[in-house]
Image (cartoon, rainbow, N blue to C red):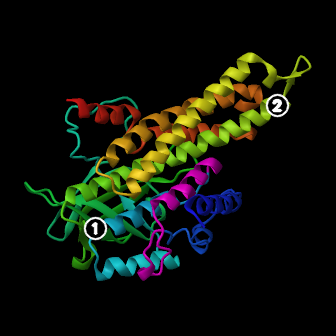
C-alpha cells in the first residue's frame, strides 16, 4: 500500500471514529493513535508526523474535543530528546495508553530570526518561559493545550547562563511547587491551562538534552511542529465549512430557486474553495518539510501557519453568513468552528508574528 492509500485509509477510519462528540483518551489510545510515531522498538507503530497530521486535520474537521494535540506534541518532545532509559520507558507507556504526556513548550524561540521588538503584534498570545538550575525548574506558561489532563508534563526549559542550552524536563502533576490551572477560553473544544513551576525538583533521569549535535535546531523543530499541527487543524476546519456550505446552498431555496444558483453565492463559495486549495498546498509542504527535518522547515511552517489560520477565520465566517439566520444559531454548530478557528489563529504565534519571521529572510 502506498502513502496515498495509507493516508486515505487512515483518514476514513479517523472520520468514522471522530463522529463521537468527545472521544476520551482510552478510545484514542486503543485506536493506536497515541503510539503512531513511537518507534517499533518501543512498541509503537513507527509512523511519522505525516500520519499524525492526517489525524490532526480530521480532528479539526470534526472540531473534536480531545487531548490528542497536547499528547502528540508530548510524543514529539520525547522523540526530540536524547535517548535514555526513562525516555524510552515513557515512550512505551505512551504506546500502550498508560501515559498521556503533554508538552509545555514555554517561550517562542528561533535562531532563524531575532524576535526583539516583535512584541505587541496583533492577535499574539504569549506562552511564557521556564528556566532550570541544577535539578530545579521555575517559570510559567499560559495557554498550554491539554496540560490539565496530562499524566506527565514535559516542560521545555533553558539552562541559565551564556549557553542557554535547551532541555526537556519531565515533571509529574502534583509535584511540590507545580501548579496547573485550567484557563477558560471562548472555544469550548479546547482545554488550555496555565502551568507554573516554583523551584520544582526534577529527578536526574528526567531531564534530557535534545538529540543531535545542534541542540538549538532540534529544539526549534519542536516549535515548528507545533505551528504546523495547528495549521493542520485549521485546514480541517476550512474543509468542513466548505463542504457544509456547498451542501446547504444546494437545498436552501429562495424565490423558488436554490440559493446556490445566485452568482453572489457562487462567487463566495469559489473564494472559499480558493482559500482551502491554497491552504492544502501550504500545509502539505509544511508537513513534508517537518517530517523530513528539512533545513528550511521553519519557512514552510510559518507560511502555513500565517496563511491557513487567518484564512480559516474568513472561511468559517463566510460559511456562517451563507447559512443565513440559521448560521448564527447555537444548533447550527458553526459557532464552535468559528471560535476554534479564532483560537488557532492566536496560539503558537499569530499570523502577524509569522509573517514578521518570514520577512527576516530578506534583511
Q: Is residue 140 left or right of residue 23?
A: left
Q: Locate residue 193: give its quadrant.
A: bottom left
The residue pinned by badge 1 equals: 169
Residue 187 rendering spot, x and y as whole percentages: 55, 44
Residue 58 falls within the magenta-colored stretch: yes
What's the residue at 42%, 60% (across, down)? Answer: 73
Q: Is residue 259 visible?
A: yes
**Quadrant in the picture for the C terminus:** top left
Using the numbered discs, state the Cα–Cα distance from disc 2 to disc 1 in whole angstroms: 53 Å
| Foreground residue among 203 and 259 | 259
Question: Magenta residues: mostly which secondary structure?
Answer: helix
The residue pinned by badge 2 equals: 250
Residue 295 vertical position relative to residue 249 in the rendered view, above or below: below
SS at badge 2: helix
> Badge 1: few (under 14), some or many (20 or more) residues near its Cα, within 10 Å?
many
What's the residue at 49%, 64% (across, down)? Answer: 149
Q: Which residues are magenta?
A: 37-63
What's the residue at 37%, 66% (across, down)? Answer: 153
Q: Locate residue 114: give its quadrant.
A: top left
What's the residue at 60%, 67% (across, down)? Answer: 1
Residue 172 rendering spot, x and y as whole percentages: 36, 72
SS at badge 1: strand
Q: Is residue 201 visible?
A: no
Amino acid at each position: 500500500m502506498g502513502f496515498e492509500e495509507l493516508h486515505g485509509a487512515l483518514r476514513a477510519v479517523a472520520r468514522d471514529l471522530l463522529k463521537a462528540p468527545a472521544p476520551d483518551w482510552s478510545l484514542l489510545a486503543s485506536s493506536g493513535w497515541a503510539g503512531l510515531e513511537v518507534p517499533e522498538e518501543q512498541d509503537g507503530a513507527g509512523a511519522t508526523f505525516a500520519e499524525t497530521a492526517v489525524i490532526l486535520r480530521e480532528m479539526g474537521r470534526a472540531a473534536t474535543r480531545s487531548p490528542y494535540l497536547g499528547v502528540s506534541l508530548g510524543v514529539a518532545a520525547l522523540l526530540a530528546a536524547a535517548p535514555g532509559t526513562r525516555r524510552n520507558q515513557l515512550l512505551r507507556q505512551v504506546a500502550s495508553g498508560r501515559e498521556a504526556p503533554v508538552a509545555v513548550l514555554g517561550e517562542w524561540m528561533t535562531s532563524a530570526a531575532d524576535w526583539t521588538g516583535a512584541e505587541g503584534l496583533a492577535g499574539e498570545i504569549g506562552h511564557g518561559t521556564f528556566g532550570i538550575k541544577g535539578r530545579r525548574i521555575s517559570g510559567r506558561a499560559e495557554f498550554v493545550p491539554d496540560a490539565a489532563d496530562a499524566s506527565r508534563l514535559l516542560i521545555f526549559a533553558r539552562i541559565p547562563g551564556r549557553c542557554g542550552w535547551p532541555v526537556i524536563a519531565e515533571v509529574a502533576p502534583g509535584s511540590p511547587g507545580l501548579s496547573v490551572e485550567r484557563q477558560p477560553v471562548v472555544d469550548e473544544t479546547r482545554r488550555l491551562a496555565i502551568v507554573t513551576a516554583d523551584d520544582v525538583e526534577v529527578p536526574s533521569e528526567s531531564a534530557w538534552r535534545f538529540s543531535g549535535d545542534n541542540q538549538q535546531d532540534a529544539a526549534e523543530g519542536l516549535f515548528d511542529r507545533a505551528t504546523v499541527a495547528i495549521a493542520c487543524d485549521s485546514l480541517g476546519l476550512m474543509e468542513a465549512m466548505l463542504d457544509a456550505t456547498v451542501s446547504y446552498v444546494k437545498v436552501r431555496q429562495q424565490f423558488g430557486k436554490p440559493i446556490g444558483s445566485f452568482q453572489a453565492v457562487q462567487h463566495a463559495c469559489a473564494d472559499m474553495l480558493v482559500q482551502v486549495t491554497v491552504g492544502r498546498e501550504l500545509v502539505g509542504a509544511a508537513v513534508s518539510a517537518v517530517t523530513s527535518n528539512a533545513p528550511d522547515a521553519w519557512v514552510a511552517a510559518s507560511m502555513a501557519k500565517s496563511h491557513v489560520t487567518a484564512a480559516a477565520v474568513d472561511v468559517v465566517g463566510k460559511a456562517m453568513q451563507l447559512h443565513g439566520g440559521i448560521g448564527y444559531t447555537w444548533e447550527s454548530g458553526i459557532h464552535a468552528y468559528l471560535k476554534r478557528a479564532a483560537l488557532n489563529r492566536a496560539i503558537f504565534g499569530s499570523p502577524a508574528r509569522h509573517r514578521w519571521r518570514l520577512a527576516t529572510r530578506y534583511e
